[in-house]
Image: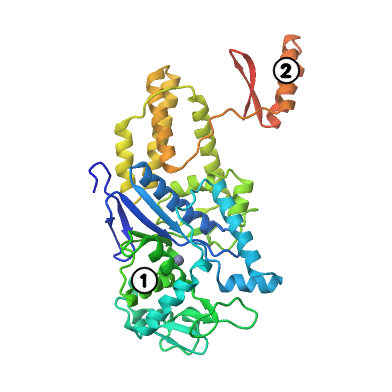
Amino acid sequence: MTPDLPQIHLHDTATGSVRPLELREPGVVSIYCCGPTVYAPPHLGHGRFVLVYDVLRRYLEWAGYEVRFVSNITDIDDKIIERAQNEDRAWQQITQRCEKVWFDTMDRIDVMRPTETPHATEYVDQMVELISTLIGRDAAYTTDDGVYLAVEGIEGYGLLARQSLDQLVEGGGDREVFGADAKRHPADFALWKFSKPGEPAWPSPWGEGRPGWHTECVVMSLDLLGEGFDLHTGGLDLAFPHHENERAQAVALGAEFAKHWMHNGFVEMDGEKMSKSIGNVKNLVDLADRHDPRAYRLLVLQSHYRSPIEVTDTSIANAEAALGRLDTFARRTSDLDGAADTGVLDAFRTAMANDLDTPAGMQFVFNAVRDANSALDAGDTEAAATAAATARELCGALGLRLEDAAAAVPAEIEALVAERTEARAAKDWARADAIRDELSAAGWTVEDSADGPVARPL
Ligand SMILES: [Zn+2]
């Protein structure tokens, strides 16, 4: 490891413990993050995972690591086909439209684009090749509806579920969890599904069909990141069966797969697991439309990534209020010029290296903001400049954008301010007060400055 890079510790689902992230190549972190299946707008669960791994990536880069971040687009899936059939449209129309909405929304919530974005449709040939190899090794077999992986031969199957195969079957071995087919074992899963008439189909030696979801990710991650890549990430709901089954194929192939597994916790909306809408927010697009698009990032930062997070009207309103205070700080200190406190930066770097402790990271931000404000109140510009530079540096490391430009004042507000100034000059206090009330109803206040009265948002 390069001496000045912090040693990162992360919880590993495979061991159930926090342990050092060992890198294949010093200073370079290779990450695969399961991306969206593009058949609907992104929901709040998507929002959480993209924000968690965006923060991880930004922090690693800020700390000096180079990050290769691969995140796929699943553009072959039963849900896409179902929607296309229901709406009598080409499935490509659904996937292209949903992918555009996905990335537009990512831009709005400041999530960086992946280094590479493989599409499942670009990898079908390689998937067919992988399945052929697995059949050749007797690890997979054909039934009348597809090709399946035989999990009984897989060493350590159940690693990510933290259960043995027997426990898995006992606990969830009904048809709902494992499906019902002519499978040899209930936990065997589809690598290739034969297509029905009218469904999208690709050629294969076993018959026309499409790859299974678990096959898509194992092929794309190994192709772009290579064997033994550093970190595989995703929501906790993907640990089993999706990630377990990706891993099973790599084991059957004799390929070294991800060295470390990171999963983020669930999103609860008013006590329910992502099933209900809160107020008028049903998905991530609504959230970005109707609230400050940065609010969800702040919520995510204030919870540890492995804890469940609750998204409610109150928690979003609190996040927006906190952002308002951060923006006020940023405007108030925008003229100050100072260098960040390296002691605080070091402490932040260390806290975050400990299993991505973002609540501790945010505490450093809030402390620096408080110090900057109180130094300004006390007239200590130098101390204020240092604290302000520290807070800005940390916000940058977390991807938390501050708005320090004074909001543009609409013409009608400017006109009211001018009218109020005239009323005051004419000592028409009743009129001046009435205009002040009108301004505050519109969300503005008037502050006296050296250049005369100016409008500021409330
Ligand atoms: Zn995946």
Quadrant of the rendered image containing residue 234: bottom left
**Residue 274: horizontal and vertical position, in percent?**
54, 61
Residue drawn at (40%, 65%) of the image: 223
**Residue 166: horizontal and vertical position, in percent?**
34, 82
Q: Is residue 144 visible?
A: yes
**Marks 1 and 2, how far apart in space?**
68 Å
Compared to 142, does 19 lie above or below? above
Report crowding for label 1: few under 14, some 14 to 19, many 20 or more residues within 10 A (C-alpha): many
Residue drawn at (33%, 61%) of the image: 229
Report the residue marked by disc 2: 418
Q: What number is the disc on residue 247?
A: 1
Closest to the observer: 52 or 37?
A: 37
Compared to 59, does 139 lie above or below? below
Compared to 441, does 190 lie above or below? below
Q: In this view, does 50 lie to the left or right of 431?
A: left
Q: In this view, does 375 lie to the left or right of 283?
A: left
Report crowding for label 2: few under 14, some 14 to 19, many 20 or more residues within 10 A (C-alpha): some
Q: Is residue 371 left or right of residue 9?
A: right
Q: Name the colouring of the figure.
A: rainbow
Compared to 5, does 72 lie above or below? below
Q: Which of marks 1 and 2 is nearer the N terminus?
A: 1
Quick check: is the Cβ at mark 1 less than 8 Å away from ligand 1? no
> Mark 1 or mark 2: which is in front?
1
Q: Is residue 174 visible?
A: no
Q: What number is the disc on residue 38?
A: none
Question: Does dot 2 land on a helix, a strand or a loop?
Answer: helix
Q: Which amino acid does label 1 sit on?
A: Arg
